[in-house]
Amino acid sequence: MRIGFNPNKDKSLGKLDFFHQVVVPVHIPYMKDYFIDSLIILKYCLESLIITTHNNTYITVVNNGSCNEVVQFLDGLKNGGEIQELIHTTSIGKINAIVKGIAGHKFDLVSLVDADVLFVQGWQNATYKVFNAFPKAGVVTPTPNPKLVKYHTNALFFDRLFSSSLKFSKVRDSKALIMFADSIGNQNLYKDVHLSKYLTVNSGTGVNAVVGSGHFVATYRGDLFKTLDNSKDVYFLGGNAVEKHLDHPIAKKGFWRLATRDNYTYHMGNTSEPWMQQLLSEQKKNKEEHIENLNLFDYKGGNVIAILIQNLFAKLLFRKKVWKLYLRKKGLTRLEAESY
């Protein structure tokens, strides 16, 4: 039996102050073997995230079947008001955890972040500058990676193939690249030319971005997740699930994948090291930090025929001989182009 009138019925939620959501899926099933340092890494990740984000950031953590120690830590953050949303689930896979994190929300930007990322100050403003400068930017990462220059970047090359705005520039932080390679256990990931040069695009308004983006930490236009919400096979979690549900939809709409020129995030991996605590201690919370105005352009994406043409064009461009010639045209020497 119901008595009286529910005071919340037909009540407007009002305007939210948040415009940028950060979703962090967390899966630490136990505290030994591969996961022995994972809680420490998670603490570094979330503390650095909380310190470096502005007040209009909505932090969502999705506990994807983690152990009790992790649950207690996350509950403490939520109860202390350090994060805005905490979702507990059984182990359902990364993509499903992401879907739960974005469901019921509508933000201009959504950052998807692995639980082993360490943030430094300035990453949000640097990301906003790229989105503001490039109308077709669909995803921007604060960790440039020169080896991703051909990863779903067909649309960008189609749009700027012979433009002087597309050229090789000097890598600003080669040490960060070396640290990333070490964090994934592949010290031979980059060749010398990768550590010295990456392909950049100029907006014409003074903003340069690196071509290509990964997805261990990346910020997406929020409207792109309409596709993810409606995906019919979102519960299929094969090895290509992230690429299938996050990267393909962006490419199919003709959006660009970009990175900031400077490095603002570090991949920690699963082992705690002294540099992590040192870097974290250097970050200072500044609630009054200037927030770059976000002005997303209303770009709906290309039509089917346009995307098909881009894909066919890319197959030709990325052929080995053609690609090497193009790299030389954009600023590499013959020897550099051979090994890039």
Image (cartoon, rainbow, N blue to C red):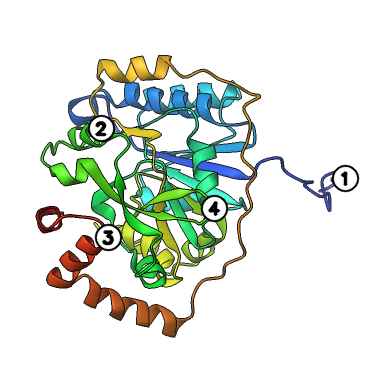
Q: Residues within 10 Å of mark 4 (few under 14, many from 20)?
A: few
Q: In this figure, which residue is indicated by the disc labeled 4? A: 205
Nearest the eye: 65 or 74: 74
> How many numbered tags mark residues here?
4
Quarter occupied by the C terminus: bottom left
Assign a secondary structure to mark 2: loop
User: Could you tell me which residue is drawn at 49 percent across and 56 percent down?
Assistant: 203
Q: In this figure, which residue is indicated by the disc labeled 1? A: 3
| Amino acid residing under circle 1 | Ile
Assign a secondary structure to mark 1: loop
The disc placed on residue 330 is 3
Assign a secondary structure to mark 4: loop
Q: CA distance from mark 4 to mark 1?
A: 62 Å
- Residue 21: x and y, percent? 56, 43
User: Could you tell me which residue is drawn at 48 percent across and 29 percent down?
Assistant: 49
| Amino acid residing under circle 4 | Thr
| Amino acid residing under circle 2 | Gly
Q: Residues within 10 Å of mark 3 (few under 14, many from 20)?
A: many
* Residue contact at pointers 4 and 2, CB within 8 angstroms: no
Q: In this figure, which residue is indicated by the disc labeled 2? A: 269
Q: CA distance from mark 1 to mark 2?
A: 55 Å
